Amino acid sequence: MSTASTAPPSHNLINRLLSGPLADLILRPWYDPLALFGVVRAYMPVSRAWAAATAAEGDPQRFLQALGQPRSLGPGLARAIAETRRRGEIHARAEAEWRDAAFGGGGADLAALEERRLACADAWMRERGAFLPAHVLRGFEPVKYDIESNADVQAHHGARLANLSIAFAGADDTTGIAASRACRLHGRNVSWLRAPAGPRGGEGPAWARVEHGDEPPKGAIVFCHGIMMEREHWTSLYDQSEVFLASEGGAPEGGSLAVISPEGPGHGRRKLPGLYGGEQILARGLGGILDYFAAHVVEVGRLIAWARAKFGGPVAVGGVSLGALTAQLVVSAARHWPAAARPDAAFLLTTNESMIDVVFRGSLAGGLNFPRALTAAGWTEADVQRWRPLVEPGGSALPPERIVCVLGTTDTVTPIAGGERLAARWSIPPANVFRWHGGHFAAAFSVLRDRAPVRRLKAAMENS
């Protein structure tokens, strides 16, 4: 892939860095082992402590109970627990004000409230860094495993496995989707959607952010995030919506898209008490993975149907990492959906056709001892294989020329061999399969450096 970029300057610090000249040094094979080490050995353990502190509401003894790890409490750790509570309370008030303004009407300055909400959320999320000194002295575990039993998984998902045509039913039901007021942020028109959660998606509502430029969008893309990626709660998290919002000139590939960014189950506003964003997917083993896809695939189908009615034109589905695994399931499940919920194109960024491959041979899962945790809970690989039809794509609802893939040549998180197998099985044209010389994280960022895959997607949507 080329490294040419014609994107306008970004308001996002991470995006500016990764689309600038330093990115040529960063987005290389050396970057991924370092990034993976940081995620597994630092970010996730301090997130575990932060989640325990959030559940403890300032009580050190409740923190130790929630942590599930006996340890002494020094003054630094006690301060981190108290500050986590304080920042969490500030965030909760800002979130409540924002919700009232966004969905309750009135004349409040929604853009200002959104800036404040996001700043408070970011400050709360960043407080997990205060747990790093305690982690260095005595490490926190990255995941608090509570693996769901085979019998419970059967009770929750057995009927879906027995009849795959209804495994992701209800994807065209847009009943209950409520749109917020819109506001202007960083040169974009921004609003939010609040909708009923999908099956096994938790009690709270599902959420999505909707963004588009000033020109009428030529279509839309529902783009799903990766695990632990919570854009609604960080001020400078990697913002992939920019590559779809940009209008780069020329037709048909120059048109801007509306971007719909859903918040996956167990993330952001939807995270469970005592867990950090994304932890429940891993902590509950296969049951967590099955629940995530059961809910989110259906939710994405509903967003596709909503976007088609709202914007007209073609609607694509896409995602990165876990989001790509979700998007490819949407492409497969859509064979059983009404036309309104079926995507017109797909954009798969760092994907793998085999969830089993990711779970048992992926470097992230391996670094977290996920296979060992499954084995300790009584699961065998053969047990997991039985559930493949609910976590891995079958056939495709799309013509091959409307699917675009970006793969990392040294990806070990969603190993590239599985992405290559999917491209071959779905007969995706070679011109639609882009390979970045680097690993999982570098390839995920690569579209900031090379917009060719996005241009290819836009062309496919124009021709749908």
Image: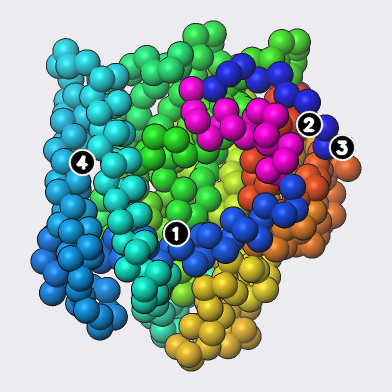
Q: Nearer the viewer, mark 2 or mark 3?
A: 2
Residue drawn at 27 percent across, 74 percent down: 67
* Farthest residue, direction right: 430
Measured as percent of width and height from the top left, residue 1 is found at 83, 37
**Residue 257 lies in the magenta-colored region:** no
Q: Earlier in the sequence, mark 3 or mark 1?
A: 1
Mark 3 → mark 1, Cα distance in angstroms: 37 Å
Q: Which mark is residue 91?
A: 4
Magenta stretch bounds:
11-27
Q: Are marks 1 and 4 in contact (CB under 8 Å)?
A: no
Residue type for callout 4: His
Q: Nearer the viewer, mark 4 or mark 3?
A: 4
Which residue is under mark 2? Answer: 3
Secondary structure under tag 2 reads loop
Q: Is residue 109 left or right of residue 327?
A: left
Q: Which mark is residue 446?
A: none
Q: Earlier in the sequence, mark 2 or mark 1?
A: 2
Report crowding for label 4: few under 14, some 14 to 19, many 20 or more residues within 10 A (C-alpha): many
Report crowding for label 1: few under 14, some 14 to 19, many 20 or more residues within 10 A (C-alpha): some
Q: Earlier in the sequence, mark 4 or mark 2?
A: 2
Measured as percent of width and height from the top left, residue 436 is found at 78, 45
Q: Does residue 232 appear in the picture of this structure? A: yes
Question: In terms of depth relative to the viewer, which is nearer, 90 or 81?
Answer: 81
